[in-house]
Image (cartoon, rainbow, N blue to C red):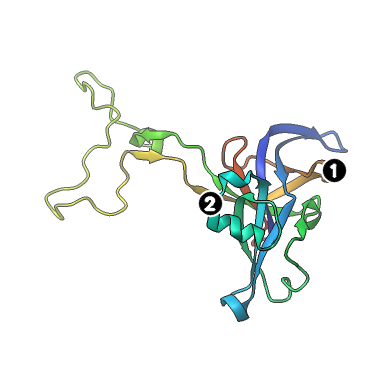
């Protein structure tokens, strides 16, 4: 599915023609350069590799720098592949720039990003446990996870909900509506919230499920 690499700018709001208030997330989507094309004949699958965000040559490793010099492109900070069908890849060439024109106002997209890291969290914050009763004599076991099993099977069962690292993982939010597009600034205004911090990188793809 064709998409773009973008950078989350922040959250704001707009007013529609009928006066309705709409909260939106602003994403700088592209322009993304086509760094490489892969076909089923040469690589076993059809895909394009897009690059986003210019970076200085001294900050790029030599093998990766050669990858960009081979196609006469400025090194890019982020690289990502998008799988395409054999017909979709035919009209795309190396060095071509893709921008917000591949999307339309009102259509739905899927946005993938890295969620905010919240550090080591307990079971109440991480999994929504209610905690133990705070009655007289409970002492300091109010927010603990409680028992995780008896003598059998004498090890922690896989998938047991326990305290641990929360957030900082890949999250995809589906079927988000594009509220507006500002092509002159390469901005896409997406209705609602998307994962990640401000200035974090996200992937915007045309939705795979229709509502």
Element type at mark 2 = loop
Residue in front for this viewpoint, 184 or 149: 184
Name the residue tied to disc 1. 184
Image point 14% across, 52% down: which residue? 154
User: Most extreme residue toward the top, as rendered?
Assistant: 136
- Position in image of residue 170 (x %, y %): 51, 49
The nearer-to-camera label among 1 and 2 is 2
Q: Looking at the image, tell me whether mark 1 or mark 2 is earlier in sequence order.
A: 2
Image point 57% across, 44% down: which residue? 59
Q: Image quadrant of residue 45?
A: bottom right
Residue 127 appearing in the image: no
Q: Residues within 10 Å of mark 2 (few under 14, many from 20)?
A: few
Q: Quadrant of the C terminus?
A: bottom right
Residue 185 appearing in the image: yes
User: Most extreme residue toward the left, as rendered?
Assistant: 151
Residues marked 1 and 2 touching at CB (< 8 Å): no
Q: Which mark is residue 61?
A: 2
Q: Is residue 132 left or right of residue 113?
A: left
Q: Residues within 10 Å of mark 1 (few under 14, many from 20)?
A: few
- Position in image of residue 106 (x %, y %): 79, 51
- C-alpha separation, residue under disc 1 versus residue under disc 2: 33 Å
Element type at mark 1 = helix
Q: Quadrant of the N terminus?
A: bottom right
Image point 54% across, 54% down: which residue? 62
Image point 64% across, 50% down: which residue? 76
Above or below, comparing residue 47 to residue 42 in the picture = above
Q: Image quadrant of residue 66?
A: bottom right
Above or below, comparing residue 201 to residue 85 in the picture = above
């Amino acid at each position: 599915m064709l998409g773009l690499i973008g950078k989350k700018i922040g959250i704001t709001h707009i007013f529609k023609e009928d006066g309705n208030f709409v909260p939106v997330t602003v994403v700088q989507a592209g322009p993304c350069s086509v760094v490489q094309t892969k076909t089923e004949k040469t690589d076993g699958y059809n895909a394009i590799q897009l690059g986003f965000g210019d970076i200085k040559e001294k900050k790029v490793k030599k093998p990766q720098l050669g990858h960009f010099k081979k196609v006469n492109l400025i090194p890019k900070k982020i690289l990502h592949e998008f799988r395409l069908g054999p017909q979709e890849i035919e009209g795309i060439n190396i060095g071509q720039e893709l921008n917000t024109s591949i999307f339309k106002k009102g259509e739905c997209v899927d946005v993938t990003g890295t969620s905010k890291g919240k550090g080591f969290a307990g079971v109440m914050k991480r999994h929504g446990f209610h905690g133990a009763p705070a009655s007289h004599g409970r002492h300091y076991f109010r927010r603990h996870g409680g028992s995780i099993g008896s003598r059998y099977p004498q090890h922690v069962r896989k998938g047991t909900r326990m305290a641990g690292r929360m957030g900082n993982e890949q999250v995809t939010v589906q079927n988000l509506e594009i509220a507006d597009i500002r092509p002159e600034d390469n901005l896409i205004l997406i209705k609602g919230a998307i994962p990640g911090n401000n200035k974090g990188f996200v992937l915007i793809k045309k939705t795979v499920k229709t509502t």
